[in-house]
Amino acid sequence: MNIIVCIKQVPDTTQVRIDPETNTLIREGVESIINPFDTYAIEEGVRLKEKFGGKTVVLTMGPPQAEAALREAISMGCDEAYLVSDRAFAGSDTLATGYTLAKAIQKIKNFDIILCGKQASDGDTAQVGPGIATQLDIPQVTYVKKIEEADEKSAQVERMTEEGFEIVKTSLPCLFTVVKEINEPRIPSLKGRMKAKKAEIVSWKAIDLDIDEARLGLTGSPTWVSKIFTPPPRPRGEVFEGEPEDVATKLVEALKDRLNS
């Protein structure tokens, strides 16, 4: 069974800064990590390979420094890594990103399952995984918490819902977005880190993909950020002090005054 795991390198959530001129994230000089939800996708991809055989490939789209995220994925057990990196991809929204990753997956070929984290910590849209599946015209199951069964033709999974969970059976190939309840990501071994250090990272530019350049980057993005701002702090409410009975009386009187004003 061949697995492709799509990951994203994101800024550490404690250091997110916004460029007020471009309304985009400032990545220079900011520590980057693998999107936390994607680490569960990596782990699940490696577990599927260990159970069924085959290989686990990791793919990301981003600047050249995203290579570090791919090497970390290899240290966790992935076999191959692909970086899609080009200035032409800058400013891509979720639609353009899904399209570009789908084209890279078509170039990789030969996959049974695509795994993504349920969403990225810097955008929180949860749209790229489903977008990839739509571009590839394959089934998708979101918020997967357990892959119960899988063979060459189908898989049965358990997905989370607001009311509980659902059991879904789907044909393969298929794309799953996973939640953190699915597993516990492993800590890379020394052997894994040595392998990652020496691994070859395949890098593709737009010219290397069978791609429509009008659908890339800002040009190919029908959505964009028009403004980003920090909401003003809420005014501090009135604080009543004293004995509980007195405080209750004051609160009732204040509420009456507000209703009558």
Image (spheres, helix red, strand yellow):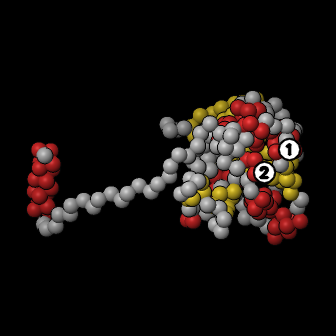
The residue shown at (73%, 47%) is: 89
Q: Is residue 177 visible?
A: no
The residue shown at (53%, 57%) is: 20
Q: Quadrant of residue 94?
A: top right
Task: Classify 10 Å Cα crowding around label 1: few (below 14), some (14-19), many (20 and above).
Answer: few
Task: Tell me the CA gap for discs 2 and 1.
Answer: 9 Å
Q: Is residue 216 left or right of residue 80?
A: left
Q: Is residue 128 left or right of residue 125?
A: right
Secondary structure under tag 1 reads: helix
Secondary structure under tag 2 reads: loop
The residue shown at (78%, 59%) is: 64
In the picture shown, does residue 66 fall above or below 176?
below
Identified by mark 2, the residue type is: Asp
- Nearer the N terminus, badge 2 or badge 1? 2
In the picture shown, does residue 259 fall above or below 174?
below
Q: Is residue 74 visible?
A: yes
Numbered tag placed on residue 13 in the rendering: none
Identified by mark 1, the residue type is: Ile
- Residue 11 at x, y = what percent? 63, 61
The residue shown at (50%, 52%) is: 228
Q: Which residue is mark 1?
A: 207
Q: Which residue is mark 2?
A: 86
Quarter of the N terminus within the rendering: top right
Q: Quadrant of residue 151?
A: top right
Of the pair 176 and 28, the residue shown nearer to us: 28
Q: Are marks 2 and 1 in contact (CB under 8 Å)?
A: yes
- Residue 171 at x, y = what percent? 76, 29
